[in-house]
Image (cartoon, helix red, strand yellow):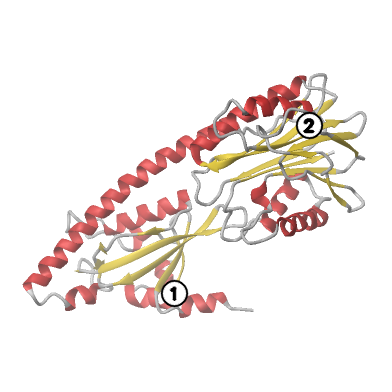
Amino acid sequence: MIDYEAVFHSLPTMVALFTTDLLYLDANEAYCSTTGRSRSQLIGRSVLDVFPDNPDDPEASGTRNVTASLRRVAATGQRDAMALQRYDVEVPGRPGVWEERYWSPVNVPVFAPDGTVALLLHRVEEVTELIRARGGADRTQVLEADLYTRARELQEVNESLRLAHAREREVALRLQEAMLPAPSPLAHHRAAVRYRPAVASLNVCGDWYDIADRPGGDGTVVAVGDVVGHGLRAAGVMGQLRSALSAASLVADGPAQALEVLGRYARTVDAAATATAAAVFIDWAGRSLTYSSAGHLPPVLWRPDGTVTYLDQATDPPLGVRPERSARPEARAEFTEGCVLVLYTDGLVERRYEDIDVGLARLADSIARHGAGDPERLADALLADLVPSAGLTDDTALVVVRL
Protein backbone atom coordinates (compact mmCIF):
# COMPACT_ATOMS: atom_id res chain seq x y z
CA MET A 1 0.00 0.00 0.00
CA ILE A 2 1.22 3.48 -0.87
CA ASP A 3 1.27 5.96 1.99
CA TYR A 4 -0.16 8.94 0.10
CA GLU A 5 0.01 11.17 3.17
CA ALA A 6 3.77 10.61 3.30
CA VAL A 7 4.02 11.31 -0.44
CA PHE A 8 2.00 14.51 -0.01
CA HIS A 9 4.28 15.85 2.74
CA SER A 10 7.45 14.82 0.87
CA LEU A 11 6.61 16.66 -2.35
CA PRO A 12 9.27 19.29 -3.13
CA THR A 13 6.58 21.59 -4.57
CA MET A 14 4.35 23.68 -2.33
CA VAL A 15 0.95 21.97 -2.02
CA ALA A 16 -2.07 22.63 0.19
CA LEU A 17 -5.50 21.03 0.48
CA PHE A 18 -8.65 23.08 1.01
CA THR A 19 -12.22 22.19 1.83
CA THR A 20 -14.90 23.43 -0.56
CA ASP A 21 -15.55 26.12 2.07
CA LEU A 22 -11.99 27.35 1.33
CA LEU A 23 -10.50 26.35 4.66
CA TYR A 24 -7.05 24.82 4.92
CA LEU A 25 -7.30 21.05 5.46
CA ASP A 26 -3.61 20.25 5.13
CA ALA A 27 -0.33 21.66 3.80
CA ASN A 28 2.94 19.92 3.04
CA GLU A 29 6.36 20.74 4.47
CA ALA A 30 7.44 22.75 1.41
CA TYR A 31 4.35 24.96 1.68
CA CYS A 32 4.86 25.61 5.39
CA SER A 33 8.59 26.35 5.15
CA THR A 34 8.26 28.64 2.13
CA THR A 35 5.37 30.67 3.52
CA GLY A 36 6.80 30.77 7.04
CA ARG A 37 3.61 29.36 8.56
CA SER A 38 3.21 26.17 10.56
CA ARG A 39 0.44 23.67 9.87
CA SER A 40 -1.24 24.67 13.14
CA GLN A 41 -1.36 28.28 11.87
CA LEU A 42 -3.06 27.10 8.66
CA ILE A 43 -5.44 24.22 9.38
CA GLY A 44 -9.06 25.32 9.67
CA ARG A 45 -8.41 28.88 8.51
CA SER A 46 -9.01 30.63 5.16
CA VAL A 47 -6.36 32.04 2.81
CA LEU A 48 -7.58 35.60 3.38
CA ASP A 49 -7.30 35.05 7.12
CA VAL A 50 -3.74 33.66 7.01
CA PHE A 51 -2.42 35.72 4.07
CA PRO A 52 -4.46 38.95 3.79
CA ASP A 53 -3.64 41.38 1.00
CA ASN A 54 -1.20 44.13 1.95
CA PRO A 55 -3.36 46.94 3.44
CA ASP A 56 -0.70 49.48 2.50
CA ASP A 57 -1.00 48.64 -1.22
CA PRO A 58 -4.35 49.72 -2.73
CA GLU A 59 -3.58 47.64 -5.86
CA ALA A 60 -3.00 44.44 -3.90
CA SER A 61 -5.39 41.70 -4.97
CA GLY A 62 -3.30 38.51 -5.15
CA THR A 63 -4.89 36.70 -2.23
CA ARG A 64 -8.38 37.70 -3.34
CA ASN A 65 -7.55 36.37 -6.80
CA VAL A 66 -6.48 33.02 -5.35
CA THR A 67 -9.67 32.84 -3.28
CA ALA A 68 -11.78 33.62 -6.35
CA SER A 69 -9.98 30.89 -8.29
CA LEU A 70 -10.61 28.33 -5.55
CA ARG A 71 -14.31 29.24 -5.53
CA ARG A 72 -14.49 28.77 -9.31
CA VAL A 73 -12.88 25.34 -9.10
CA ALA A 74 -15.29 24.31 -6.33
CA ALA A 75 -18.28 25.50 -8.37
CA THR A 76 -17.29 24.22 -11.82
CA GLY A 77 -15.04 21.23 -11.14
CA GLN A 78 -12.55 22.66 -13.65
CA ARG A 79 -8.79 23.04 -13.13
CA ASP A 80 -7.60 26.68 -13.02
CA ALA A 81 -4.00 27.61 -13.88
CA MET A 82 -3.69 31.21 -12.72
CA ALA A 83 -1.57 34.00 -14.16
CA LEU A 84 1.53 35.10 -12.26
CA GLN A 85 0.41 36.67 -8.97
CA ARG A 86 2.12 39.23 -6.80
CA TYR A 87 0.94 39.17 -3.23
CA ASP A 88 3.05 40.34 -0.34
CA VAL A 89 3.38 38.25 2.80
CA GLU A 90 3.56 39.68 6.29
CA VAL A 91 6.90 38.70 7.81
CA PRO A 92 6.38 36.23 10.70
CA GLY A 93 7.01 37.89 14.06
CA ARG A 94 7.10 41.38 12.54
CA PRO A 95 3.54 42.74 12.41
CA GLY A 96 3.03 45.38 9.75
CA VAL A 97 6.17 44.45 7.83
CA TRP A 98 5.38 43.09 4.39
CA GLU A 99 7.70 41.28 2.00
CA GLU A 100 7.15 41.45 -1.78
CA ARG A 101 6.57 37.95 -3.17
CA TYR A 102 5.62 36.50 -6.57
CA TRP A 103 3.72 33.22 -7.03
CA SER A 104 2.51 30.93 -9.81
CA PRO A 105 -0.60 29.03 -8.52
CA VAL A 106 -2.65 26.16 -9.98
CA ASN A 107 -5.90 24.98 -8.38
CA VAL A 108 -7.30 21.52 -9.09
CA PRO A 109 -10.56 19.78 -7.99
CA VAL A 110 -10.48 16.46 -6.13
CA PHE A 111 -13.66 14.51 -6.85
CA ALA A 112 -15.78 12.33 -4.58
CA PRO A 113 -17.09 8.97 -5.87
CA ASP A 114 -20.41 10.60 -6.83
CA GLY A 115 -18.66 13.10 -9.11
CA THR A 116 -18.99 16.14 -6.85
CA VAL A 117 -16.01 18.25 -5.83
CA ALA A 118 -14.83 17.05 -2.42
CA LEU A 119 -11.53 18.92 -1.96
CA LEU A 120 -9.41 21.59 -3.63
CA LEU A 121 -5.72 20.98 -4.34
CA HIS A 122 -3.68 24.19 -4.38
CA ARG A 123 -0.22 23.89 -5.93
CA VAL A 124 1.95 26.99 -6.00
CA GLU A 125 5.51 27.80 -7.07
CA GLU A 126 7.28 30.86 -5.74
CA VAL A 127 9.18 32.80 -8.41
CA THR A 128 10.24 35.78 -6.27
CA GLU A 129 13.97 34.99 -6.50
CA LEU A 130 13.73 34.63 -10.27
CA ILE A 131 12.16 38.08 -10.56
CA ARG A 132 14.77 39.61 -8.22
CA ALA A 133 17.74 37.87 -9.90
CA ARG A 134 16.81 39.32 -13.26
CA GLY A 135 16.24 42.85 -11.95
CA GLY A 136 19.75 44.24 -12.59
CA ALA A 137 19.29 45.59 -16.09
CA ASP A 138 16.84 48.41 -16.74
CA ARG A 139 15.56 46.71 -19.91
CA THR A 140 14.95 43.48 -18.02
CA GLN A 141 13.01 45.36 -15.36
CA VAL A 142 10.87 47.01 -18.03
CA LEU A 143 10.20 43.65 -19.68
CA GLU A 144 9.31 42.07 -16.35
CA ALA A 145 6.98 44.92 -15.47
CA ASP A 146 5.35 44.58 -18.88
CA LEU A 147 5.05 40.81 -18.42
CA TYR A 148 3.40 41.30 -15.05
CA THR A 149 0.98 43.86 -16.53
CA ARG A 150 0.13 41.54 -19.42
CA ALA A 151 -0.44 38.70 -16.96
CA ARG A 152 -2.88 40.85 -15.00
CA GLU A 153 -4.68 41.79 -18.23
CA LEU A 154 -4.83 38.14 -19.28
CA GLN A 155 -6.31 37.24 -15.92
CA GLU A 156 -9.02 39.90 -16.35
CA VAL A 157 -9.86 38.53 -19.82
CA ASN A 158 -9.96 35.01 -18.43
CA GLU A 159 -12.27 36.18 -15.67
CA SER A 160 -14.65 37.65 -18.25
CA LEU A 161 -14.62 34.37 -20.15
CA ARG A 162 -15.29 32.43 -16.94
CA LEU A 163 -18.26 34.65 -16.15
CA ALA A 164 -19.65 34.10 -19.66
CA HIS A 165 -19.13 30.35 -19.30
CA ALA A 166 -20.80 30.41 -15.88
CA ARG A 167 -23.86 32.14 -17.36
CA GLU A 168 -24.03 29.59 -20.18
CA ARG A 169 -23.64 26.76 -17.70
CA GLU A 170 -26.46 28.18 -15.57
CA VAL A 171 -28.72 28.22 -18.64
CA ALA A 172 -27.72 24.62 -19.34
CA LEU A 173 -28.51 23.54 -15.78
CA ARG A 174 -31.95 25.14 -15.87
CA LEU A 175 -32.59 23.51 -19.25
CA GLN A 176 -31.57 20.14 -17.87
CA GLU A 177 -33.85 20.50 -14.86
CA ALA A 178 -36.79 21.42 -17.11
CA MET A 179 -36.27 18.53 -19.52
CA LEU A 180 -35.16 15.84 -17.05
CA PRO A 181 -37.30 16.31 -13.93
CA ALA A 182 -37.35 13.86 -11.06
CA PRO A 183 -39.86 11.03 -11.68
CA SER A 184 -43.29 11.14 -10.09
CA PRO A 185 -44.00 8.57 -7.35
CA LEU A 186 -44.97 5.17 -8.81
CA ALA A 187 -47.59 4.03 -6.31
CA HIS A 188 -45.85 1.44 -4.11
CA HIS A 189 -42.95 0.88 -6.49
CA ARG A 190 -39.59 2.51 -6.00
CA ALA A 191 -37.46 4.04 -8.72
CA ALA A 192 -34.23 6.01 -9.00
CA VAL A 193 -32.84 8.08 -11.87
CA ARG A 194 -29.37 9.47 -12.47
CA TYR A 195 -27.91 11.81 -15.06
CA ARG A 196 -24.16 12.36 -15.40
CA PRO A 197 -22.73 14.70 -18.07
CA ALA A 198 -19.45 14.15 -19.84
CA VAL A 199 -16.56 15.92 -18.10
CA ALA A 200 -16.08 18.33 -21.02
CA SER A 201 -19.76 19.23 -21.45
CA LEU A 202 -21.88 22.11 -20.15
CA ASN A 203 -23.68 19.67 -17.83
CA VAL A 204 -26.41 19.05 -20.38
CA CYS A 205 -26.21 16.77 -23.39
CA GLY A 206 -28.29 14.46 -25.55
CA ASP A 207 -29.08 11.59 -23.16
CA TRP A 208 -32.51 11.42 -21.52
CA TYR A 209 -34.84 9.28 -19.47
CA ASP A 210 -38.57 9.17 -18.86
CA ILE A 211 -40.71 7.26 -16.39
CA ALA A 212 -44.45 7.69 -15.96
CA ASP A 213 -47.64 5.76 -15.19
CA ARG A 214 -49.98 4.98 -18.07
CA PRO A 215 -53.63 6.04 -17.95
CA GLY A 216 -55.67 3.77 -15.71
CA GLY A 217 -52.88 3.20 -13.24
CA ASP A 218 -52.18 -0.44 -14.15
CA GLY A 219 -48.98 0.14 -16.09
CA THR A 220 -45.83 2.24 -16.26
CA VAL A 221 -43.61 3.31 -19.14
CA VAL A 222 -39.85 3.52 -18.65
CA ALA A 223 -37.65 4.85 -21.45
CA VAL A 224 -34.15 6.11 -22.17
CA GLY A 225 -32.66 7.67 -25.27
CA ASP A 226 -29.48 9.11 -26.73
CA VAL A 227 -29.00 11.91 -29.26
CA VAL A 228 -25.62 12.06 -30.98
CA GLY A 229 -23.53 15.04 -29.90
CA HIS A 230 -23.12 17.32 -26.89
CA GLY A 231 -24.15 20.79 -25.81
CA LEU A 232 -27.29 22.83 -26.11
CA ARG A 233 -28.16 21.71 -29.65
CA ALA A 234 -28.15 18.03 -28.68
CA ALA A 235 -30.13 18.91 -25.56
CA GLY A 236 -32.76 20.69 -27.66
CA VAL A 237 -33.20 17.64 -29.90
CA MET A 238 -33.29 15.44 -26.82
CA GLY A 239 -36.12 17.50 -25.35
CA GLN A 240 -38.20 17.18 -28.51
CA LEU A 241 -37.75 13.40 -28.72
CA ARG A 242 -38.39 12.83 -25.03
CA SER A 243 -41.64 14.81 -25.15
CA ALA A 244 -42.77 13.06 -28.33
CA LEU A 245 -42.15 9.57 -26.92
CA SER A 246 -43.80 10.47 -23.62
CA ALA A 247 -46.93 11.57 -25.46
CA ALA A 248 -46.92 8.55 -27.82
CA SER A 249 -46.51 6.12 -24.91
CA LEU A 250 -49.74 7.32 -23.33
CA VAL A 251 -51.85 6.16 -26.29
CA ALA A 252 -49.75 3.46 -28.00
CA ASP A 253 -50.63 -0.23 -27.66
CA GLY A 254 -47.03 -1.07 -26.81
CA PRO A 255 -43.43 0.14 -26.93
CA ALA A 256 -42.91 -0.88 -30.59
CA GLN A 257 -45.78 1.32 -31.72
CA ALA A 258 -44.58 4.20 -29.54
CA LEU A 259 -41.06 3.96 -31.01
CA GLU A 260 -42.47 3.71 -34.53
CA VAL A 261 -44.32 7.00 -33.99
CA LEU A 262 -41.15 8.53 -32.52
CA GLY A 263 -39.09 7.31 -35.48
CA ARG A 264 -41.39 9.02 -37.97
CA TYR A 265 -41.25 12.21 -35.94
CA ALA A 266 -37.44 11.99 -35.74
CA ARG A 267 -37.23 12.24 -39.55
CA THR A 268 -38.62 15.77 -39.27
CA VAL A 269 -36.10 16.91 -36.66
CA ASP A 270 -32.57 17.93 -37.66
CA ALA A 271 -29.85 15.78 -36.04
CA ALA A 272 -32.39 13.25 -34.73
CA ALA A 273 -32.20 10.63 -37.49
CA THR A 274 -29.55 8.47 -35.77
CA ALA A 275 -30.81 8.93 -32.22
CA THR A 276 -31.50 5.74 -30.25
CA ALA A 277 -34.14 4.86 -27.67
CA ALA A 278 -35.43 1.93 -25.64
CA ALA A 279 -38.89 1.67 -24.07
CA VAL A 280 -40.37 -0.80 -21.59
CA PHE A 281 -44.08 -1.06 -20.77
CA ILE A 282 -44.55 -2.54 -17.29
CA ASP A 283 -47.79 -4.46 -16.69
CA TRP A 284 -48.06 -4.59 -12.90
CA ALA A 285 -51.16 -6.79 -12.79
CA GLY A 286 -49.85 -9.28 -15.34
CA ARG A 287 -46.28 -9.08 -14.01
CA SER A 288 -44.79 -8.76 -17.45
CA LEU A 289 -42.47 -6.41 -19.33
CA THR A 290 -43.04 -5.57 -22.98
CA TYR A 291 -40.00 -3.92 -24.53
CA SER A 292 -38.56 -2.63 -27.78
CA SER A 293 -35.29 -0.96 -28.73
CA ALA A 294 -34.49 1.43 -31.56
CA GLY A 295 -30.75 0.94 -31.92
CA HIS A 296 -30.28 1.23 -28.16
CA LEU A 297 -28.42 -1.02 -25.74
CA PRO A 298 -30.73 -3.60 -24.12
CA PRO A 299 -32.41 -3.08 -20.73
CA VAL A 300 -31.39 -5.39 -17.89
CA LEU A 301 -33.60 -7.52 -15.62
CA TRP A 302 -32.23 -8.68 -12.25
CA ARG A 303 -34.07 -11.49 -10.45
CA PRO A 304 -33.99 -12.20 -6.71
CA ASP A 305 -32.13 -15.48 -7.36
CA GLY A 306 -29.20 -13.35 -8.55
CA THR A 307 -29.53 -13.96 -12.31
CA VAL A 308 -29.10 -11.05 -14.70
CA THR A 309 -30.80 -11.07 -18.11
CA TYR A 310 -30.38 -8.63 -20.98
CA LEU A 311 -33.70 -7.88 -22.69
CA ASP A 312 -32.28 -8.12 -26.21
CA GLN A 313 -34.95 -9.92 -28.22
CA ALA A 314 -36.50 -6.81 -29.81
CA THR A 315 -33.67 -4.67 -31.22
CA ASP A 316 -34.07 -2.61 -34.38
CA PRO A 317 -32.18 0.21 -36.18
CA PRO A 318 -32.03 3.72 -34.67
CA LEU A 319 -34.84 6.24 -34.98
CA GLY A 320 -35.33 7.78 -38.39
CA VAL A 321 -33.19 5.30 -40.38
CA ARG A 322 -35.34 2.17 -40.20
CA PRO A 323 -37.27 1.12 -43.34
CA GLU A 324 -41.06 1.39 -42.97
CA ARG A 325 -41.86 -1.90 -44.71
CA SER A 326 -42.44 -3.76 -41.44
CA ALA A 327 -43.40 -3.01 -37.86
CA ARG A 328 -40.81 -2.59 -35.15
CA PRO A 329 -40.36 -5.74 -33.06
CA GLU A 330 -41.25 -6.04 -29.42
CA ALA A 331 -40.83 -8.86 -26.90
CA ARG A 332 -42.12 -9.83 -23.47
CA ALA A 333 -40.48 -11.03 -20.28
CA GLU A 334 -42.12 -12.17 -17.06
CA PHE A 335 -41.05 -10.84 -13.68
CA THR A 336 -41.71 -11.61 -10.04
CA GLU A 337 -41.96 -9.30 -7.07
CA GLY A 338 -38.56 -7.98 -6.09
CA CYS A 339 -37.03 -8.01 -9.55
CA VAL A 340 -35.15 -4.92 -10.73
CA LEU A 341 -35.31 -3.27 -14.17
CA VAL A 342 -32.32 -1.17 -15.29
CA LEU A 343 -32.24 1.09 -18.35
CA TYR A 344 -29.13 3.10 -19.25
CA THR A 345 -27.36 4.92 -22.06
CA ASP A 346 -24.06 3.94 -23.66
CA GLY A 347 -21.90 6.35 -21.65
CA LEU A 348 -22.22 3.97 -18.70
CA VAL A 349 -20.67 0.98 -20.46
CA GLU A 350 -18.76 2.12 -23.55
CA ARG A 351 -15.03 2.81 -23.25
CA ARG A 352 -12.66 3.90 -25.97
CA TYR A 353 -10.53 1.05 -27.36
CA GLU A 354 -12.66 -1.53 -25.53
CA ASP A 355 -15.22 -3.97 -26.96
CA ILE A 356 -18.78 -3.13 -25.90
CA ASP A 357 -19.25 -6.68 -24.59
CA VAL A 358 -16.63 -5.96 -21.93
CA GLY A 359 -18.63 -2.98 -20.67
CA LEU A 360 -21.90 -4.95 -20.73
CA ALA A 361 -20.30 -7.75 -18.73
CA ARG A 362 -19.03 -5.18 -16.23
CA LEU A 363 -22.56 -3.79 -15.88
CA ALA A 364 -24.08 -7.26 -15.40
CA ASP A 365 -21.51 -8.09 -12.72
CA SER A 366 -22.23 -4.86 -10.83
CA ILE A 367 -26.00 -5.42 -10.98
CA ALA A 368 -25.56 -9.01 -9.78
CA ARG A 369 -23.58 -7.81 -6.76
CA HIS A 370 -25.82 -4.90 -5.80
CA GLY A 371 -29.24 -5.87 -7.18
CA ALA A 372 -30.76 -6.62 -3.79
CA GLY A 373 -30.24 -3.05 -2.63
CA ASP A 374 -32.67 -0.14 -2.65
CA PRO A 375 -32.93 1.51 -6.12
CA GLU A 376 -31.18 4.65 -4.88
CA ARG A 377 -28.27 2.64 -3.47
CA LEU A 378 -28.14 0.43 -6.55
CA ALA A 379 -27.99 3.48 -8.84
CA ASP A 380 -25.13 4.95 -6.80
CA ALA A 381 -23.31 1.60 -6.75
CA LEU A 382 -23.53 1.25 -10.52
CA LEU A 383 -22.07 4.72 -11.04
CA ALA A 384 -19.33 4.04 -8.49
CA ASP A 385 -18.41 0.75 -10.20
CA LEU A 386 -18.65 1.89 -13.82
CA VAL A 387 -17.74 5.59 -14.00
CA PRO A 388 -13.95 6.00 -14.54
CA SER A 389 -12.01 8.00 -11.97
CA ALA A 390 -11.17 10.58 -14.63
CA GLY A 391 -14.88 11.13 -15.32
CA LEU A 392 -17.16 10.23 -18.20
CA THR A 393 -16.18 10.92 -21.80
CA ASP A 394 -19.86 10.59 -22.77
CA ASP A 395 -22.97 11.63 -20.90
CA THR A 396 -25.02 8.96 -19.12
CA ALA A 397 -28.63 8.47 -18.11
CA LEU A 398 -29.68 5.67 -15.75
CA VAL A 399 -33.07 4.42 -14.52
CA VAL A 400 -33.55 1.75 -11.83
CA VAL A 401 -37.03 0.39 -10.99
CA ARG A 402 -37.85 -2.14 -8.29
CA LEU A 403 -40.63 -4.33 -9.69
Residue type at mark 2: give it: Arg
Q: Estimate the x, y position of residue 33 in percent, counting from the top left.
A: 36, 78
Asked if 93 appears above or below 204 in the picture, the reply is below
Work out whether residue 55 can be spotted: no
Q: Is residue 57 left or right of residue 103?
A: left
Residue picked out by circle 2: 328
Q: Is residue 71 left or right of residue 286?
A: left
Q: Secondary structure at mark 2?
A: loop
Foreground of the two, 224 or 128: 224
Residue picked out by circle 1: 28
Asked if 275 appears above or below 151 in the picture, the reply is above
Q: Secondary structure at mark 1?
A: loop
The residue located at (8%, 70%) in the rendering is 139
Quarter of the image that includes the C terminus = top right
The residue located at (58%, 57%) in the rendering is 112
The residue located at (73%, 45%) in the rendering is 297
Residue type at mark 1: give it: Asn
Work out whether residue 85 can be spotted: yes
Asked if 351 appears above or below 233 in the picture, the reply is below
| Residue 275 in which image quadrant | top right
Foreground of the two, 151 or 27: 151
Cβ atoms under marks 2 and 1 closer than 8 Å: no
Q: Estimate the x, y position of residue 333 in percent, counting from the top left.
A: 89, 39
Quarter of the image that includes the N terminus = bottom right
